[in-house]
Image: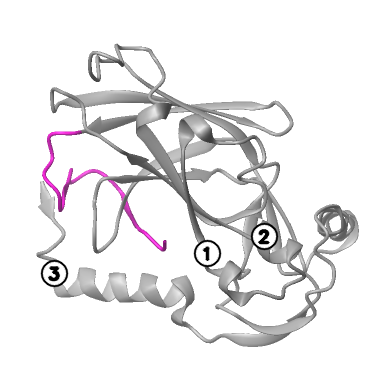
Amino acid sequence: MKNIKNLTAGKLVLLLAILLLSGCYAGERYFIRSFVEEYAMYDGIVIERAFSSTSTKHLRLRVKSDRWVNYLSEGADKAKYEQLCTLYGDTSYNMEVNRPLEMARVVTKYPHFSIIDVRSDKDFDAEHPAGTPLNDIMSIRFQSAKEFIESGYSDPTLEEKIYTKSLAELDKDDLELSIHNLFLIFDKEPEVLTTHLLTFECINAMGEKYTTTYSYDFSLAEGEVEPEVTVTYETL
């Protein structure tokens, strides 16, 4: 096991680099008409362990993208980007912003996830035997461009607003225009702290279904992760 409190100098440098990439780097300035700069299409989902200064127990849900359309696209991809901007009413942002390195600053997934279902291969507790949904004891944390765009870009606090909802209460359009990272959080731990094989099923707004699994070791103390696990710095 690896304790994140005892990082080597090299890992500290890497962590600082990640911090810079997450928003501290003042890159090239450019003008953009729409707040959302890129839409990521995808063909799969991935679950990763995530950590922040407060927890190593969160899971990050990301997509495996095979196509991106953005403000720099050309041809059919440019037309698709503009179509989506129009669809979501995101056409009059008209601001000059910083681009970190060569990455888009604000990215959303398309189509968005409407349902996220999580199950375990082991009994979680008396109310959640193996194979039953864990949604009522899990939360999702995310940011969204939706309210900011609907406000006419008038309330800058909505750009950084963090939303937290129970997976069981997730509305079909809550994740529409979700930006940056999606984090899944257990609101309680199982009665027996052992390793569970978790199955994640996501259904998007088009009815497409994506499934993956993740082996989650609940016995690890806060601040520890398995050596072979790839951890992701949490930006929320």
Residue 65 located left or right of residue 183:
right
Camera-side residue: 9 or 161? 161
Q: Is 104 included in the stretch rendered in magenta?
A: no
Residue at x 57% of width, y 35% of height: 44
User: Which residue, given by chain and number where applicable, does mark 2 sit on?
Assistant: 147
Q: How far apart are marks 2 and 1 (CA)?
A: 9 Å
**Magenta residues, as a range?**
218-236
* Residue 189 percent across, percent down from the top left: 21, 32
Q: Do the residues labelled 2 and 1 touch (CB within 8 Å)?
A: yes
Mark 2 and mark 3 lie on one chain; the one further toward the N terminus is 3
**Which corner quadrant of the image does residue 220 belong to?**
top left
Tell me, for residue 8, which label it has, or none: 3
Q: How far apart are marks 3 and 1 (CA)?
A: 33 Å
**Which corner quadrant of the image does residue 205 belong to?**
top right
Question: Which is in the foreground here, disc 2 or disc 3?
Answer: 2
Q: How dense is the environment of label 3, judged by Cα within 10 Å: few (below 14), some, or many (20 and up)?
A: few
SS type, badge 3? loop
User: Which residue, given by chain and number where applicable, does mark 1 sit on?
Assistant: 161
SS type, badge 2? helix
Q: How dense is the environment of label 2, judged by Cα within 10 Å: few (below 14), some, or many (20 and up)?
A: some
